[in-house]
Amino acid sequence: MPDAPRPAGRRAYHWLTAVPTVAMLGGVPFVNRVHPMVLGLPLLMAWIAGWVVLTSATMGLVLYLDRARGGRDR
């Protein structure tokens, strides 16, 4: 059976947008500790704050890749 066609404009790198969500939520059971402290924050808070920043970087990367492939602005 042939593969189903992708919706128009959908690219494989769009799956990068799921990485911050999975990392932020999936990592919580592993970093749910008060010690060690990272920059004065408990590890869990530092983990979440770090992924908030990395989420912006990931979305910027996807935007860059979209524009490099000729994606239109929405």
Image: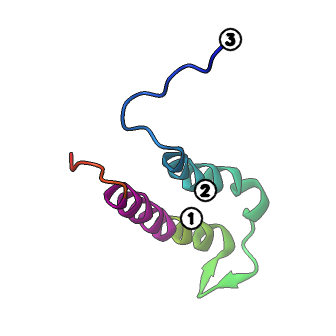
* Residue 71 as seen in the image, left or right of residue 16: left
Residue at the extreme top: 1
Q: Earlier in the sequence, mark 3 or mark 2?
A: 3
Quickly name the residue at label 3. 1
Q: Is residue 21 above or below residue 48?
A: above
Depth check, front residue: 52 or 13: 13
Span of residues in magenta: 52-68
The image position of residue 21, as x and y in percent, is: 56, 50
Spatial CA distance of label 3 from label 2 is: 37 Å
Q: Is residue 6 above or below residue 70?
A: above
Q: Quadrant of the C terminus?
A: top left
Q: Amino acid at mark 1?
A: Ile
Spatial CA distance of label 3 from label 1 is: 43 Å
Residue at the extreme bottom: 39
Q: Main secondary structure of the magenta part?
A: helix
**What's the mark number on residue 48?**
1
Which secondary structure, mark 2? helix
The image position of residue 49, as x and y in percent, is: 52, 70
The image position of residue 26, as x and y in percent, is: 69, 50
* Residue 56 as seen in the image, left or right of residue 40: left
**What's the mark number on residue 24?**
2
The image position of residue 32, as x and y in percent, is: 73, 62
Spatial CA distance of label 1 from label 2 is: 6 Å
Crowding at mark 2 (Cα within 10 Å: few <14, some 14-19, many 20+):
some
